Amino acid sequence: MRKIQNNEVSADMAEAILGDQDQYSCSICLDLLRDPVTIPCGHSYCMSCIGECWNTNDLNGTYRCPQCRQTFKSKPPLNRSTVLAEIMEKLRSTESAQSLAGPGEIACDFCSGEMIKAVKSCLECRASYCQTHVQPHYNVPALKKHKLVKAAVIPVCPKHDKVLEVYCRTDQKCVCMHCLLDDHKGHDTVSSTIERNEKQIKLTDTQTKVKQTIQAKEKELQKMNVDIASHSDSAKKAVENSKKVFSELVKFIEKKSNEVIEKIKAEEKADLDQGAKLQKKLQEEITELKKREGVLEDLLQTDDNIQFLQNYEVVSYSSGSDGFPSHSFKPFCLYPDVNDLVCELKNRLETIFNQEINETVQKVSDLAIKNNPVCIKVGDRVRVKPSIKTPKYDWGSAITHKSVGVVKDIKSDKCLVIDFPGFASWRGLLSEIEPVTDDDEGGSSTLNCKIKIGDKVYVKPSVETPKYLWGSVSHKSIGSVINVQGETVTVNFPEQEGWLGEVSEMELVVSADLGSPSHAYFKIGNRVSVKSSVKDPKHGWGSVTHNSIGVIKRIQGESLTVEFPEQTDWTGIASEMELINGDVSEVLSLRPGVRVRVKPTIRTPAHGWGSVTKHSIGVVEAIDGTKVTVNFPEQLSWTGIVSEMEAVP
């Protein structure tokens, strides 16, 4: 290749070299080469840097390369590399032209016009320099003693306007030398370098621990990903296996169905063959009788008395039907009986399937709870799990995955009764619910405040307008707290359910202030009706009338949930209702062993008909509050409401 002449070093070449600037830096001053020289081993240095290095580190007249440590017996001549020097000059000019100070970057304090980016800062001069203006600190002997650092804002003492060089361990802050004679006199102080080294060792240990923790967490995540993928695959296999089992079950039922159908058809053919024989025989007898009828007709039409008398005995003797016994079609198989048998089989299979499948589903839920036990107790704040698309007993009118409620009761069948804001006594399965912690809601809870769920409260007299406005509530309104979430409280007032307010706006009601509430006389299981003086109940009539008599199912503050024959889960206000004397179970004389049926007025029972009809008569198996369990011939352990049933004499 042609040698590059000094005047052929272009800016383009310098720009190409700029991308690999570290290769053209002096290993002693760590800056771009200035007056570059190359020693016999091939390494290049600034002339002043290598000269000063050899002058201060002369050992027995030997000289070493600072990089490869090669030793020279005599001091090698330091000849300036002209080509490399020109490259460095072009490189500096190109770098300087391209390195304008941007936002947040340090600018050279000596450049006029365009603000060139600084590359070094001097702690002695307390100034920053670009590549051009920093050169005197490398060439001028007096400036060579100054300490250069990477371009940065030089922190100074606000009191003495001096560079911060010392660290005060007593006050844990950086100070200047003058501070040691002033505010920090007698304190435990060290140089910033020593403190930096000690803290850097600690910080390095911390960084190592953080890295180890990251690695451990990454392994946990990797294992968790494998476990989740394996669990998902297991669930898919379970689904596929369930589909296969149920498909085989369907095929089995179809096979047995075909066998029954073939049997019915075979019996039908046998019966039809017998019927065809009888039809043929009857037809032959009819033909024979018609012939005799013709003989009789001929005899009756004869005019000769002698001939008539001579033939009378013969004809009259054989003209009767004694020789033709009566016939009837009597099939071997009665198909209405077959229909009854098939229907009975269907009902039994449905009952068994419902029971077995429900038990299987429940066992799956129990297994999930057993493997992942969740300690939920009365008073806990809970919500529906995000994985639940539709709860078993539906969502209700105001409940979503974000709704947070309070557990009111836990039933023996792993069913929870929960009070949500705007929806009291919601029912859901334990396996569908998860507890809500303070972290889940992004802050600390105020459940520990003086107002808690179940308390009677009213709006403070000092509050002119509540944060969420009055609605139908007034200062005289007394309600029951159903939820406390952060600083927000949800209250059921007689005038308005699910009313929202601030905890600071509410006052606890002393028991003496309550007097005798109208619902003190009501208990779950009481028979009630709407007062005749009530024209329009607060929540509407629905299918209920003044003549309707129902049973109280739930009491929540002033709100009553009543099961009427015409409408289940009807909601009313205690002040709108009146008691009906006598207990419903006594009036109906319902007890285990009594024969009952569904009332004719009931269109659809609360829990559905199942295989039961209006004509079905069963025997009471058990009574639990307002629920009754009946054994019908069509369906065992059928569940209904007491108010839906009537005793059969």
Image: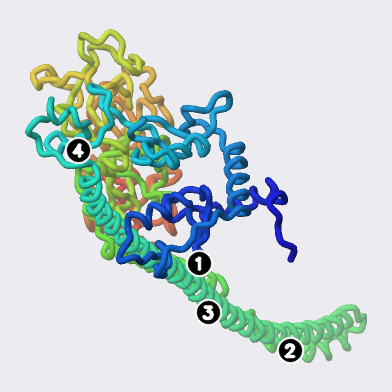
Which of the two discs, 4 and 1, sits closer to the camera? 1
Camera-side residue of 231 and 565: 231
Image quadrant containing the N terminus: bottom right
In the rendered image, residue 197, in percent from the top left (x then y), is placed at: 24, 50
Query: Whole-Å distance between the Cαs marked 4 and 1?
Result: 45 Å
Residue displayed at 40% across by 30% down: 127
The label on residue 252 is 3
| Labels 4 and 2: the sequence-earlier one | 4
Left/right of residue 645 with respect to residue 343 in the rendered view: left
Q: Residues within 10 Å of mark 3 (few under 14, many from 20)?
A: few
- The kind of secondary structure element at disc 3 is helix
Camera-side residue of 24 and 246: 24
Which of the two discs, 3 and 4, sits closer to the camera? 4
| Labels 3 and 1: the sequence-earlier one | 1
- Report which quarter residue 192 is drawn in: top left
According to the image, label 1 marks what residue? 40
Q: Amino acid at mark 4?
A: Tyr
Query: Whole-Å distance between the Cαs marked 3 and 4?
Result: 87 Å
Residue 360 appears in the figure: yes
Q: Residues within 10 Å of mark 2 (few under 14, many from 20)?
A: few
- The kind of secondary structure element at disc 2 is helix
Picture layout, residue 259 above or below residue 162: below
Query: Whole-Å distance between the Cαs marked 1 and 2?
Result: 159 Å
The label on residue 317 is 2
Camera-side residue of 398 and 442: 442
According to the image, label 4 marks what residue? 167
Left/right of residue 133 with respect to residue 319 in the rendered view: left
Residue displayed at 51% across by 31% down: 103
Q: Residues within 10 Å of mark 4 (few under 14, many from 20)?
A: many
Which of the two discs, 4 and 2, sits closer to the camera? 4
Residue displayed at 26% across by 33% down: 164
